[in-house]
Image (tube, rainbow, N blue to C red):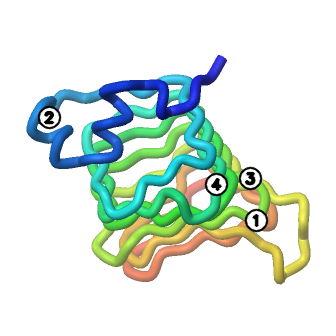
Amino acid sequence: MSRKIHDFGEIYDYLKDGKLRAKEAGSQVIVVKNADFSGERFGGTEWQYFDFVDCSFESNYTIMLKWLTDSTFTNCRFRGIFGLGQTTNVRFVHCKVEGESHIGFDWKSRNLVFENCEFTNSNSDPNHIGSVGSAGEIMFISCKTRNIAWGGEQEINAQKLYG
């Protein structure tokens, strides 16, 4: 059963303030499990050394990061519009991106991997297709996609994509 992310106390504080997290926890990996990020606002901050497991991200423009590094998302669900900033060493494993969602990563992004993820949108109207893309590097491995565009401007590597 998931809990709202603002009920996570210190972890919530670290997600709101990347400098506080670096000062107090250093490079220790922090696990965030079964969190519901719906409607929570995280803007202009940095996320580093987080492992998100079984989390739900559902909102539009409320998560707009400066950068995201050294983190993983496992079995997470995304629905909405997200700007995850400059991204380095980040993996999405067994995640779902649903509907007309848009997830974007900035131009210096590198070592960004989606593995065994599903990108699904029941609406096939070209004006309502979702997207996952990076202005930097991005890799898709063994992912399923339907009515969601994916791409990378500097480098894209797609292996075993299924429609």
* Circle 2 residue: 27
Q: Residues within 10 Å of mark 2 (few under 14, many from 20)?
A: few
Image location (x, y in percent) of residue 35: 54, 29
Precedes in sequence: disc 2 or disc 1: 2
Label annotation for residue 98: 3
Q: Residues within 10 Å of mark 3 (few under 14, many from 20)?
A: many
Q: Residues within 10 Å of mark 1 (few under 14, many from 20)?
A: many
User: Marks 1 and 3, how far apart in space?
Assistant: 7 Å
- Are discs 2 and 4 less than 8 Å apart at CB? no
User: Marks 2 and 1, how far apart in space?
Assistant: 35 Å
Q: Nearer the viewer, residue 115 or 57?
A: 57
Name the element at disc 4.
Answer: strand
Q: Residues within 10 Å of mark 4 (few under 14, many from 20)?
A: some
- Are discs 2 and 1 less than 8 Å apart at CB? no
Three-letter amino acid code at disc 3? Glu
* Circle 4 residue: 59
Please name the residue shown 44% across and 82% down the image.
153
Please name the residue shown 63% across and 67% down the image.
102
